[in-house]
Image (cartoon, rainbow, N blue to C red):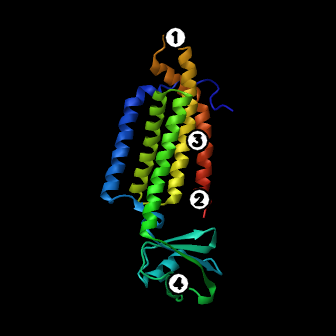
Amino acid sequence: MEIFKRVPKFNFMAKRNLAIAFSITIILVGFISILLHGGLRYGIDFAGGTLVQLKFINPPVIEDIREGLKKIGLGESTIQEFGSKNHILIRVERSEEKLEEMGTKIKSSLIDKFNVDSIIVERVEMVGPKVGKDLQEKAILSIVYAIIGIVIYISWRFEFQYAIAAIIALIHDVLVTMGAFSLADKEFTLVIVAAFLTIIGYSLNDTIVVFDRIRENMRRKGKTLLVDVINTSINQTLSRTILTSGTTLLVVVALFFLGG
């Protein structure tokens, strides 16, 4: 399947300096945002805290739950649906309460809004600060190990200079996404780490395809300039890039609007 009937002739490389300047600006804005926020906003997985899962007989209104939690000083907790509208996850950043007491306390705070018999405390879990720190280290190591593995693979498959180019591209994607999370003040959790690894995988997949085409074109380039070879290679793989990224985007949009 091809989007373009003929190979397009977009001059991508002519805009490379503008693109580099734009990328550096976005990364710097992200770094400034992270510094102003005092770092990323870690979720319970990393910062430690308590997670309470409730089951309601009838689907509750999130705002009613938040109003009830304000009475016990937990109004800023993260509240979200889990699997279905009847199941609610409440994430409390820090608490000195015992696990059983926390579940009971939250349930009692919702009596004014809901029938006490319609609420079931299904589980209460706690992540301590030490465990959170250990998870932080392992999350960072997982990304570092992935990048090291990529360097080894591309160096073997192509050349070391290709590996350096690929790693710069991957680090760019990670830094831009991290900056976006800071600007949006979103929580950074283990699920987000998995998303970062997915981004690395998708980015690398497209990079390998373009590199393959560059290598093929380099063999028969003759007196053609390297810039023109890269331009030609990107144009030749453009249909495939748009199709792959476009179908992935459709899935992500569906999950964003229809996911729990």
Percent coordinates x, y for residue 57 in the rendering: 65, 81
Percent coordinates x, y for residue 240 in the rendering: 61, 34
Would you name the residue on which mark 4 appears? 100
Q: Earlier in the sequence, mark 3 or mark 2?
A: 3
Give the distance between the C-alpha atoms of the residues marked 4 and 1, in whole angstroms. Answer: 74 Å
Would you name the residue on which mark 3 appears? 245
Amino acid beneath label 4: Glu
Give the distance between the C-alpha atoms of the residues marked 1 and 3, in whole angstroms. Answer: 32 Å
Q: Earlier in the sequence, mark 4 or mark 2?
A: 4
Q: Nearer the viewer, mark 1 or mark 3?
A: 1
Give the distance between the C-alpha atoms of the residues marked 3 and 2, in whole angstroms. Answer: 18 Å
Disc 3: CA contacts within 10 A as few (<14), some (14-19) or many (>=20):
few
Would you name the residue on which mark 1 appears? 222
Q: Earlier in the sequence, mark 4 or mark 1?
A: 4
Which SS class for mark 4? Answer: helix
Which SS class for mark 2? Answer: helix
Check if mark 4's residue and mark 2's residue have beta carbons within 8 Å.
no
Q: Nearer the viewer, mark 3 or mark 4?
A: 4
Which SS class for mark 1? Answer: loop
Q: Earlier in the sequence, mark 3 or mark 4?
A: 4
Would you name the residue on which mark 2 appears? 257
